[in-house]
Image (cartoon, rainbow, N blue to C red):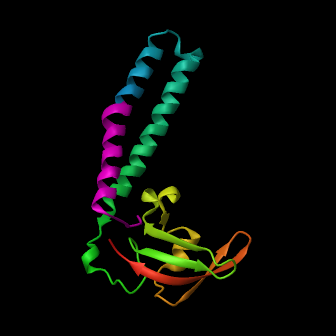
């Protein structure tokens, strides 16, 4: 069974654009590379042909996975979401109980995650630990070097 992922309209458009690029640009390039390698003669000892076929296989696998993700993608109507709890597409400000550091994240689908811009996946350890929490709750999150406790300070949507 395929997993449903939730996206903003912009996130889903980006995913579809990437899929279309793979199909419309990269796939023809891969076929062309195979054709050029085939024209070079004996296929039994043609490493260039083997490499081109392998690259095409990897590309087709990537396209197939992306098609599945797009088919199971759902756009979130953020106006219908409960703003009192941390959900996908929530902005959340948290405070580390150990060192007092405050961080702000937006929880997004795996394919939209970008730590540099403060977007973390709902499937990441921190994302999973924060889901469903309310302001004032403490999230205990298992990380490779132990358990970290975060206080939820603020939740909002844009």
Q: Name which residue lies at 35% across and 51% down.
A: 15
Instruction: Tell whether 64 sits left or right of 126.
Output: left
- Which quadrant of the rendered structure holds the N terminus? bottom left
Q: Name which residue lies at 54% across and 26% down.
A: 51
Residue 21, by quadrant, is top left
Q: In this view, does 13 lie above or below 107?
A: above
Q: Is residue 154 magenta?
A: no
Image location of residue 123, percent across then percent down: 51, 68
Residue 94 in view here? yes
Q: Name which residue lies at 38% across and 21% down.
A: 32
Front position in the image: 60 or 122:
122
**Main SS, magenta residues:** helix
Front position in the image: 147 or 91:
91
Residue that lies at the very extreme toward the bottom in this rendered image: 136
Q: Name which residue lies at 58% across and 19% down.
A: 47
Front position in the image: 11 or 115:
115
Residue 122 in view here? no
- Which quadrant of the rendered structure holds the C terminus? bottom left
Image location of residue 4, percent across then percent down: 38, 67
Front position in the image: 13 or 64:
13
Residue range of the region highlighted in magenta in the rendering: 1-27
Q: How many marks?
A: 0
Image location of residue 77, percent across then percent down: 26, 72
Q: Is residue 149 above or below residue 45?
A: below
Q: Is residue 40 above or below residue 116?
A: above
Q: Does the magenta stretch include residue 4?
A: yes
Residue that lies at the very extreme toward the right in this rendered image: 145
């Amino acid at each position: 069974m395929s997993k449903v992922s939730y996206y903003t309209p912009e996130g889903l458009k980006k995913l579809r654009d990437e899929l279309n690029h793979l199909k419309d640009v990269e796939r023809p390039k891969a076929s062309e590379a195979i054709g050029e390698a085939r024209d070079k003669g004996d296929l039994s000892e043609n490493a260039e042909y083997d490499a081109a076929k392998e690259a095409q296989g990897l590309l087709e696998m990537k396209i197939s996975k992306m098609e599945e993700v797009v088919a199971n993608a759902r756009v979130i109507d953020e106006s219908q979401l409960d703003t009192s709890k941390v959900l996908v597409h929530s902005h959340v400000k948290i405070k580390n109980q150990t060192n007092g550091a405050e961080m702000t994240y937006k929880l997004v689908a795996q394919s939209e995650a970008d730590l540099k811009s403060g977007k973390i996946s709902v499937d990441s350890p921190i994302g999973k630990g924060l889901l469903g929490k309310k302001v004032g709750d403490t999230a205990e999150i298992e990380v490779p070097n132990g358990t970290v406790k975060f206080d939820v300070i603020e939740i909002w949507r844009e």
